[in-house]
Image (cartoon, rainbow, N blue to C red):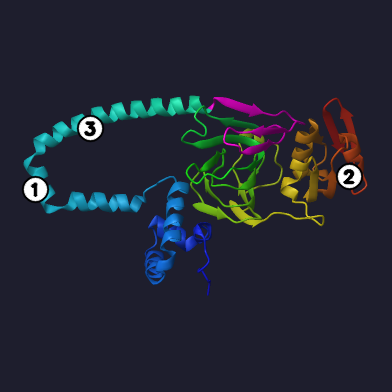
Amino acid sequence: MIDRSRFDAEDFLVDNTFQLYCAGTDRLCTEYWEKYISAHPEQTTVIAEAKRLYVILSGNKRPLNNQLETFKENFDSPSKTLKLNRNFAWLKIAAAILVIAGAGFFYLNHRLQKDARENFQAKVFTTKSGERKKIMLPDGTTVLLNAKSSLSIGKEFNDKLREVNLKGEAYFDVVHNKNKPFKVHTHDFNINVLGTAFNVKAYPDEITSEATLIRGLITMEAVNGNGGTITLKPSQKVTFYKELAPEAKQKVLKPISSHPEITINHYTLIKDSTIVETAWTQNRIEIYDQDFDEIKGILEKWYNVEIKFTNPEIEKYRFTATFSRETIDQALKALQDVEYFKYEIKGNQVIISK
């Protein structure tokens, strides 16, 4: 049996049954936690704080089933049905008013969303291939931006909201502020943060996107709605297998449909306590039992080159290696010691053959 007597708010938040209780979507979980709270009055304050944080992290979304039930109860009321029959003419007038108001609402909403999008592009940080950049955000949060990436923030960042858009890879060390959760938006998923350190890798041209939690607490939601809300604990990594654009699919020879859509594992820790997923923040490339096709993109972004294979068999060669100050020529020579292949460098293009 789990001893929850020393739980803090974050400990309750990572419990899936507690999340379902807060969401109000599971009757058994609701009954269980209501009994638990009644039996442990000494934890009332910390549980209330956990529920408050859940509401903040989930974006204050009221459960849809509750809204439907409220609507059904109001609509099915006998007195309201009788009143509707007596005032049918007024109902038609009200409908007309609703159409006009609705049109106005959608126009206003469209304008607000447009303004929000324009506002969000107030400041954009970018890196080229072979470049990495350290950024200090207005709230004190530190961001390390990896090669060929972009991070955008709005003019109102840290006023009422702390939201950023990421394309590529970045390491975040977020300043804790329970009243202003930090949100990271990517093409594939959104991340809600209180105060923590984590790595996000979300390149549009790669078949996977991933988030790795180093410390603290984050919750994630896939943009397409699949997988629900995922709560990560330190050392865990979520990988999203995505559908590529047609031009990107042509570059991928192996099928991606064999993978589950979402997987949760632990980050890769090697013998000197280096975390493979964040080694780039220490100006190192850590390749750990990966095939040539997987590390191709890493080498391209790191060295600002374009790699082409002339034989699909070469792409299956597997390597484990560490690079820091090596040139692309030195890195390829080191890989040749593991598997034999030929290569030719022409400007920023590297042709690899068997």
- Number of dots carrying numbers: 3
* Residue picked out by circle 3: 98
* Residue picked out by circle 1: 82
Residue 160 in picture, x, y percent from top left: 46, 35
SS label for mark 3: helix
Q: Identify which amino acid the numbered label 2 is placed on.
A: Leu
Along the viewing direction, whichever of 17 and 9 lies nearer the viewer:
9
Along the viewing direction, whichever of 210 and 135 lies nearer the viewer:
135
Residue 234 relative to residue 326: left or right: left
Residue 125 falls within the magenta-colored stretch: yes
SS label for mark 2: helix
Along the viewing direction, whichever of 261 and 16 lies nearer the viewer:
16
Residue 173 in picture, x, y percent from top left: 64, 43
Residue 107 falls within the magenta-colored stretch: no
| Distance of label 3 from label 2 (alpha carbons) | 68 Å
Along the viewing direction, whichever of 325 and 9 lies nearer the viewer:
9
Any part of residue 204 in sight = no
Residue 80 in picture, x, y percent from top left: 13, 48
Say whether disc 2 or disc 1 marks the residue closer to the N-terminus. Answer: 1
| Distance of label 1 from label 3 (alpha carbons) | 21 Å
Specify start and end residues of the magenta stretch as a single range: 121-149
Q: Identify which amino acid the numbered label 1 is placed on.
A: Leu
* Residue picked out by circle 2: 335
Residue 334 relative to residue 151: left or right: right
Residues marked 1 and 3 touching at CB (< 8 Å): no
Q: Which of the 4 quarters of the picture holds residue 235? A: bottom right
Q: Residue at x 73, y 54 (%)?
A: 268
